[in-house]
Image: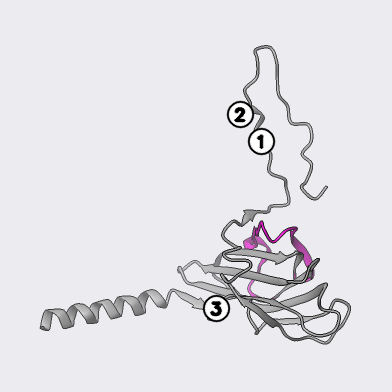
Amino acid sequence: MFLRAVQQRVFATLLATISLGISTLNAETFWIWADGPGSRDAASIRRTFEVSSDLKEAILIVTCDNGAQLFLDNKAVLTNADWNEASRIDLTRKLIPGKHELRAECKNEGDISGFVARLSLKSISGKETLVETDASWEATVPGRSLWKPARVVAKYGDAPWGDALANASASSGAPRVTDPASIQIRPGFKVELIHAVPKSD
């Protein structure tokens, strides 16, 4: 009995130690949108967050039904063209210690609209802070300055979007292309990359 009690106490201590390594600003991730007249087709969504002086890595994953452009401190950093393909970007070099604002200009082309994001901030010490979309974000209709708490559309993982962030692809501003050296050709021929056309073109 004594050994079992000791094992349970050690296990509980281990869980507490592990939990200290991750700090989440929101308990769960939600799909969100603006509310009110004019919000069906478009929404502006924003969130401020703090960055510590020992930031090691900052990874942002987003998707939007039907698409969105992301701004960090009013500078465009990422475009998500289709909710079926989530977008991922490394923001580490763009962040300095202090307060920052992440804003999304979202569009919708159907009846159902939603935006979801997850920002992971990892420190040198190993601590991870998650900034995830929920009602604490602010939203408004583009062109209006009246910001209100975002409207929660659905819990992440629920229909119709499911685990939409799982297939996030990297976005570095440069298109992904096939390495010419990996293409098999007949002797005497040569493959060269002349120009890579971005997906949006």
The amino acid at mark 2 is Ser
On screen, 122 above or below 179?
Answer: below
**Whether label 2 touches label 1, CB < 8 Å:** yes
x, y percentage for residue 34? 76, 80
**Whether label 2 touches label 3, CB < 8 Å:** no
Dot 1: within a 10 Å radius of its alpha carbon, few (fewer than 14), some, or many (20 or more) residues? few
- Which quadrant would residue 189 be assigned to in this image? top right
Quarter the N terminus occupies: bottom left
| Mark 1, residue position | 178
Between marks 2 and 1, how big is the CA–CA gap?
7 Å
Horizontally, is 126 left or right of 74 in the view?
left
Between disc 1 and disc 3, the foreground one is 3
x, y percentage for residue 124? 49, 66
Question: Depth check: 60 or 167 in front?
Answer: 167
Between marks 1 and 3, how big is the CA–CA gap?
38 Å
| Mark 3, residue position | 28
Question: Depth check: 42 or 147 in front?
Answer: 42
Between disc 2 and disc 3, the foreground one is 3
Upstream in the sequence, badge 2 or badge 3? 3
On screen, 191 above or below 26?
Answer: above
| Mark 2, residue position | 182
Upstream in the sequence, badge 1 or badge 3? 3
Question: Depth check: 170 or 41 in front?
Answer: 41
The amino acid at mark 3 is Glu
Q: Secondary structure at mark 3?
A: loop
x, y percentage for residue 55? 56, 68
Q: Secondary structure at mark 1?
A: loop
Q: Which residues are magenta?
A: 72-100
- Which quadrant would residue 90 be assigned to in this image? bottom right
Dot 2: within a 10 Å radius of its alpha carbon, few (fewer than 14), some, or many (20 or more) residues? few
